[in-house]
Image (tube, rainbow, N blue to C red):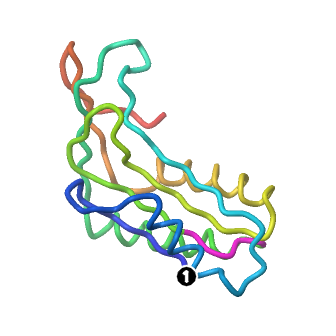
Amino acid sequence: MPTGILARKEDFIDLSSLIKMVKDNVREKNCGAIVTFTGIVRGKTLDGKTVEKLEYEVFEEAARKSLEEMSRALSLISGVLDVVICHRYGTFAPGDEVLYVVLATERSSTAFDVLKLAVNRVKHEIPIWKKEHTTDGSYWVEIE
């Protein structure tokens, strides 16, 4: 069952529990691959500044709806058996995990293609904004 999760930093969500959820959902299906993506806060900006923290702000109702709709749409791609996308929000330090994508597919080639699509869609479509706090100041980050 495709799932989109929006979680506060304080909510305990870890990758292993999401993988277990997907495995349980596809137990009786023709699953050939489970792939994951974990988005982590970088310690340096693209121009080399040291990141002290990263702050994610979110329009909760719209983000929850978008994550659910995105998970459902990705699950309709041929060969996809299950999708879980979890984006966390709040204030994070470098090294903290902020995004998880877990996909179960019939074939590995489908898994990698859909994983890339999912990550790009999250970055561009979910109403979540990030503000980098660096040693040189703070600013809102443009989509990469």
Front residue of 70 and 37 = 37
Instruction: Indicate the position of residue 110 as horizontal and vertical percent values.
Output: 77, 60
Is 46 drawn above or below residue 92 in the view shown?
Answer: above
Front residue of 54 and 102 = 102
Relative horizontal placement of residue 9, taking residue 63 as reference (left or right): left
Front residue of 89 and 107 = 107
* Residue lying farthest to the bottom in this orientation: 28
- Disc 1 marks a residue whose amino acid type is Met
Is 77 drawn above or below residue 53 in the view shown?
Answer: below
Residue ID for mark 1: 1
Relative horizontal placement of residue 137, taking residue 28 as reference (left or right): left
Is 61 drawn above or below residue 87 in the view shown?
Answer: below
Q: Residue at x 24, y 27 (%)?
A: 139
Q: Residue at x 78, y 58 (%)?
A: 108
**How would you classify the magenta stretch by its main secondary structure?**
strand
Q: Secondary structure at mark 1?
A: loop
**Residue 37 part of the magenta-drawn span:** no
Task: Tell me if mark 1 has few (under 14), some (14-19) or many (20+) residues whose alpha carbon lies within 10 angstroms of its own.
Answer: some
**Residue 82 part of the magenta-drawn span:** yes
Q: Residue at x 46, y 44 (%)?
A: 39
The image quadrant that residue 133 belongs to is: top left
| Rendered-image quadrant of the N terminus | bottom right
- Residue stretch rendered in magenta on the structure: 79-83
Instruction: Indicate the position of residue 66 as horizontal and vertical percent values.
Output: 42, 67
Instruction: Indicate the position of residue 96 as horizontal and vertical percent values.
Output: 33, 40
Instruction: Indicate the position of residue 71 as horizontal and vertical percent values.
Output: 53, 70
Front residue of 73 and 92 = 92
Q: Residue at x 73, y 83 (%)?
A: 29
The image quadrant that residue 13 belongs to is: bottom left
The image quadrant that residue 46 belongs to is: top left
